[in-house]
Amino acid sequence: MSKRQILINATMSVTQIVVISVVLFVLYKFLLNTIGVAQLGIWSLVLATTSVTQIANFGLSGSVVKFVAKYVARGEDENISGVVQTAALSVAAFGGCVLLIGYPIAKWVLGLVIENQHLPLALSVLPYAFLALWSMMITGIFQAGLDGYQRIDLRSLLLMGGAILHLLLCFVFAPIYGLIGVAYARVLVNVLILISSWLLLKRCLPVLPVFPYRWNKGLLREIIDYGINFQIISITAMLYDPVTKALLSKFGGLSMVGYYEMASRMVQQFRALIISANQVLVPAIADLHERNQKLIQGIYKASYRLIFYIVLPFLSIIIVLTPLISEIWIGHYESIFVFFAILLAVGWFLNILAGPAYFANLGTGDLRWNTVSHVTTAVLNGGLGLLFGIYYGGTGVVIAFVFSLVAGSLIIPISYHIKYKIPLRELFPRESIMVGLTSGTGILVTMLLYYQFRASWCIMAVASLVILTFSSIIFIPIWVHPMRKRLTGWINYELLNKR
């Protein structure tokens, strides 16, 4: 895979996240005014509950990336076609069965965590959530095929178009049908993305038939054997959101779930700006694993140093902007939203530092420590979430989740450095110390300015003051950092063809 294609994929991934972030900002503000925060919390809780049934995926989407990339490197188109068709048909069949079995269980779970007056509405949108999920699981196989072909740029274009279409459909359906209109929009968009993903993959691999029909037991066994760890990872990762939101609903109420959903989506979109660019390394490393394994460690070290350089100021500016985002997005300063967003930003951005090692493990097929990390996070989240929820309410549930996330995430980079004899001190690169110090200083100074002037100045004046102050504090350390020069040179040479 050329450096140019990696950069194009990373650029398109970041563009995708920016576009979807803007769409989500507009969508959630519209839904707050149209259906209210409580119904937004219901929709979030229903989606989180149904997501557990993705166990039927058997980790196949992750396996497809690995095997498609491997067979592309070998030029074996028939095997690529067999892998994609077998995985898609298996997920469609297994997923349908699991969803049928899981439907009454989901109804029972929702009855436990949602108040009686809101339960009928939640149950009315449940079938649509299941249908949207089923189509999304199949789509995941086709998009994994695109990733294996190293055409993440095509997938990004597709997802951006889907997000914009979903927003437009919500504008039409939500005022007429309320929450169930949001469900209609989700189903329609997912089905369209499913069809489009298959057509784009067929464009990359013309030997694919018009409809998947080929099922190969041997290929299924091969990709499931590789996907066992993926399945464990998928199951444990899928438990994070449902467990946290169920406990939050129980100990904090639906409004708290709604604000948590908004804070979580905001942080995840900011996080995805970095993680999606880093994720393009999976097919690249899988390709190198087949061709030249000696280059993998160089890619890992460069990727980690770049991620660390980006994460520190990025996390800091999210913390600084969160109160302002609350006033613009929600319409007022909402302390619960701000508290949740800052906590989640710290947790998820520390999790990003595990990304280079995590994706290197995916590319080489060594998933043991990735699995241990997810299991640790899931077990701690369930146990501590219940304990903290009993004693500290909804805020305790979120604190428990963030603690569990950080503890589980640290396992991956530490184990990777030990395995490949990389000094642990390189987990905090020396060249980034000044960026870290100025980022912390910027947070303290700008938060003091915000709380000093928020009551007497207009929101735009406060926002301008905060942004300008923070930028002036961190600009010089970021500009003189050696990673900035290296990144600029790479972009100029690989993308713009400049020496």
Image (spheres, grey):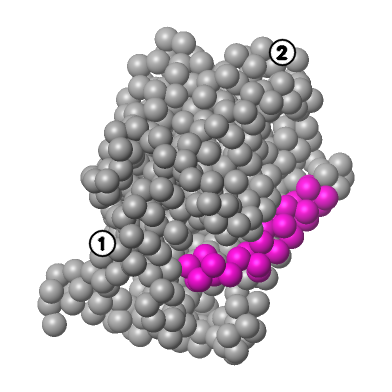
Quadrant including the C terminus: bottom left
Q: Residue 116 at what x, y percent from top left?
A: 75, 15
Find out whether the residues at labels 1 and 2 contact each other: C-beta distance under 8 Å: no
Sequence order check, earlier mark of 1 and 2: 1
Report the front residue among 150 and 457.
150
Which numbered disc covers residue 290? none
Question: Which residue is located at x 44 percent, y 59 percent?
Answer: 67
The magenta segment is 360-385
Rendered position, 249 above or below 124: below
Question: Which residue is located at x 65 percent, y 67 percent?
Answer: 368
Residue 444 within the magenta-colored segment of the rendering: no
Q: Residue 260 at what x, y percent from top left?
A: 61, 40
Amino acid type, callout 2: Gln
On the rendered structure, is 208 left or right of 324? left
Q: How many marks?
A: 2
Indicate which label's residue lies in the foreground, 1 or 2.
1
Q: Residue 5 at what x, y percent from top left?
A: 26, 65
Residue denoted by label 1: 8
Rendered position, 90 above or below 340: above
Amino acid type, callout 1: Ile
On the rendered structure, is 151 left or right of 435? left
Report the front residue among 270 and 439.
270
Question: Which residue is located at x 29 percent, y 81 percent?
Answer: 485
- Tell me if residue 481 can be seen: no
Residue denoted by label 2: 117
How many residues crowd around disc 2 within 10 Å: few (fewer than 14), some, or many (20 or more)? few
Rendered position, 52 above or below 192: below
> Where on the picture, by quarter, is residue 409?
bottom right
Report the front residue among 262 and 120.
120
On the rendered structure, is 459 left or right of 150? right
Q: Secondary structure at mark 2?
A: loop
